[in-house]
Amino acid sequence: MAADVLDATFAALADPTRRAILARLMEGEATVTELAAPFAMSQPGISKHLRVLERAGLISRGRDAQRRPRRLEAGPLKDAMDWLANYRSYWEESYQRLDDLLGELESGGPNAVERESP
């Protein structure tokens, strides 16, 4: 996956308004007016957010007579999840090592710390 695509995805996801728009589009396609309804922002303001999401490939624009509904395009989200999965295995291994060490300390194993008697 190209770094610029991943950069665009994470940049688009960095804004809470854009994340809310994506969450709404998970329910189905919606027009700009429908997407703007829950926000205290102008339609041009929402349109700017939609352009960022479109450039990142996270949404697409359809055509239904006079309507121009937007729909979610989940491909870039999967790519981001795949990239993050590499780090998930790193953290799982780190936590497993910590769990092993704590288990040894609790059982008095070779890494156990000696306690002084009162």
Image: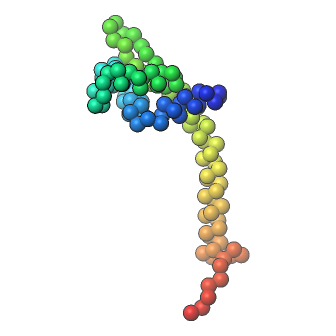
Kindly give the residue lying farthest to the top in the view shown.
65
Q: At 61% across and 27% down in the image, what residue appears?
A: 4
Mark count: 0
Looking at the rendering, which quadrant does residue 34 occupy? top left
Q: Is residue 42 left or right of residue 86?
A: left
- In the rendered view of the protein, which quadrant contains the C terminus? bottom right
Residue 83 vertical position relative to residue 25 in the rendered view, above or below: below
Is residue 100 found left or right of 76 in the rendered image? Answer: right
- Residue at point 65%, 67% (across, down): 101
* The N terminus lies in quadrant: top right
Question: Residue 44 falls in which quadrant of the image?
Answer: top left
**Nearest to the observer: residue 5 or residue 81:** 5
Q: Position of residue 60 (x, y in %)?
A: 46, 18
Residue 51 position in % (x across, y down): 45, 21
Residue sitting at x 63%, y 59%: 96
Q: Is any part of residue 30 visible from this angle? A: no
Name the one closer to the observer, 42 or 57.
42
Seen in the picture, residue 4 relative to 109 is either above or below; the reply is above
Q: Mark yes or no: residue 60 visible.
A: yes
Q: Residue furthest right?
A: 110
List x then y, in percent, for residue 107.
63, 76
